[in-house]
């Protein structure tokens, strides 16, 4: 990003109530602009390359006019007008009406930069013949072998097996299952509870005592308040007008005097005098042991059926008939065309010539 330009400078006036704007002038730049404007006012034109000759060389500030210009294999004399441009070796000169001014260098330009015409040949258009393939037929033998990862499943059916079993029903004898229970307290023992400071919850007891007061003595001083903080100097730049403006800012405004504390001179520590209290409950009968007896029982039976889960404990008798498979025989065979050659394509193009002619029209 280019640096911002400054064309104007604005500063506060001597009274501090307004501002003054100054325009910045570069005399050398204005002179250079006028010279360039004079040279290009009527346009510029390239008139040729100075013919190489030790006795005929121009330089910055040279007044030679007319000059000798290359014209193909010969030379010609040309009188330069204001704005005419010539090349000499790798240097560029422009005629300002009185002298030649060096203003550039043509380093890196090759011979074609100074040529009037140039030509070359190329073959842009044409076609490529379509290749053909010639192959020979050969036999392929396919064999079938047992393989769990094979890719062919023969056709066929499997007969549905049948199962013949022996029905069994398992029933237990009578089982005495407890129906009701009775629980009684066998013995109790006395316990007491000591009340100490509660770790959490609502306090229910406040011990007696007293707490003496505290006294604080301060050191003070007097300071003035600030009713306005003022403002800092600032600078602003406006790109559209290229204006740089400065502001001096303002000082803070002093207010009325205030008394404030500076340090704590003395603090008297408080003290507490209390009465020690220990709280104990009366005896509380707490159950120590229990007695549980079965009041009544009832008889139950259990029927055993097929288990939904767990280890089987019973296997019914019976047999399953062996299934049979009936399949369809399949013969696998085929042919392939694997060997052969591809003909080499050929390209047929149309030759053309490109001619380049520079346009020297101003």
Image: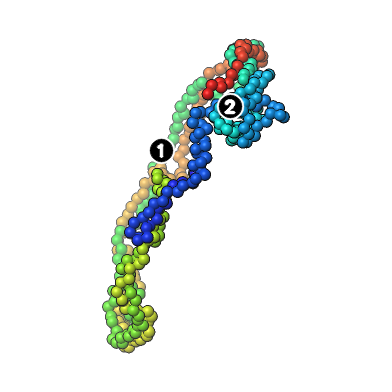
Check the image and report above or below for 124 versus 292: above
Residue 250 vertical position relative to residue 154 in the rendered view, above or below:
below
- Label 2 secondary element: loop
User: Residue 138: percent from the left, percent from the top?
Assistant: 65, 13
Choose between 261 and 259: the one closer to the eye.
Answer: 259
Q: Is residue 139 visible?
A: no
Q: Place residue 224 in its image quadrant.
A: bottom left
Instruction: From the top left corner, tell me how far across and down residue 125 is, in percent.
Output: 58, 14
Nearer to us: label 1 or label 2: 2
Which residue is at 38% across, 49% downward?
Answer: 172
> Is residue 2 visible to the viewer in this orientation of the structure?
yes
Image vertical order of residue 26 relative to residue 66, above or below: below
Q: Quadrant of residue 74?
A: top right
Task: State the residue in front, 64 or 343.
Answer: 64
- Could you say which disc has been placed on residue 40 in the image? none
Count the labels in the image. Answer: 2
Residue 180 lies, in percent from the top left, at: 29, 61
Q: Nearer the viewer, residue 237 or 362?
A: 362
* Left or right side of 169 for 55: right
x 45%, y 29%: residue? 162
Disc on res. 80: 2
Q: Residues within 10 Å of mark 1 (few under 14, many from 20)?
A: few
Q: Which residue has dot 1 on it?
A: 167
* Image x and y of residue 307, in percent: 41, 44
Q: Is residue 297 above or below residue 154?
A: below
Disc 1 to disc 2, how far (Cα)?
130 Å
């Amino acid at each position: 990003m280019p640096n911002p330009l400054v064309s104007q400078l604005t500063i506060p006036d001597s009274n501090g109530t307004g501002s003054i704007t100054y325009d910045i002038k570069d005399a050398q730049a204005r002179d250079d602009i006028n010279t360039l404007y004079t040279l290009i006012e009527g346009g510029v034109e390239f008139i040729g390359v100075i013919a190489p000759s030790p006795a005929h060389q121009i330089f910055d500030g040279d007044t030679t006019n007319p000059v000798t210009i290359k014209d193909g294999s010969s030379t010609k004399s040309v009188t330069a007008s204001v704005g005419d441009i010539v090349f000499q070796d790798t240097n560029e000169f422009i005629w300002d009406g009185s002298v030649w001014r060096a203003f550039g260098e043509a380093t890196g330009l090759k011979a074609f930069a100074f040529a009037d015409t140039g030509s070359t040949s190329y073959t842009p258009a044409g076609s490529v013949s379509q290749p053909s393939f010639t192959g020979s037929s050969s036999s392929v033998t396919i064999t079938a072998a047992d393989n769990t990862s094979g890719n062919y499943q023969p056709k066929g059916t499997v007969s549905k097996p049948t199962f013949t079993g022996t029905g069994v029903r398992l029933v237990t004898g009578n089982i005495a299952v407890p129906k009701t229970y009775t629980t009684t307290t066998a013995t109790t023992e006395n316990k007491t509870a000591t009340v100490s400071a509660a770790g959490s919850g609502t306090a229910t007891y406040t011990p007696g005592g007293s707490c003496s007061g505290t006294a604080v003595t301060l050191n003070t001083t007097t300071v003035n308040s600030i009713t306005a903080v003022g403002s800092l100097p600032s600078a602003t730049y406006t790109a559209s007008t290229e204006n740089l403006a400065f502001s001096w800012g303002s000082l803070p405004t002093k207010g009325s005097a205030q008394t404030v504390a500076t340090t704590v001179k003395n603090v008297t520590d408080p003290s507490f005098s209390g009465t020690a209290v220990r709280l104990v409950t009366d005896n509380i009968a707490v159950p120590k042991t229990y007695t549980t007896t079965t009041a009544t029982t009832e008889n139950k039976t259990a029927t055993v059926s097929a288990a939904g889960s767990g280890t089987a404990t019973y296997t019914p008798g019976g047999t399953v008939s062996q299934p049979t498979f009936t399949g369809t025989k399949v013969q696998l065979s085929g042919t392939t065309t694997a060997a052969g050659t591809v003909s080499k394509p050929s390209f047929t193009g149309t030759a053309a010539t490109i001619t380049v002619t520079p346009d020297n029209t101003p």
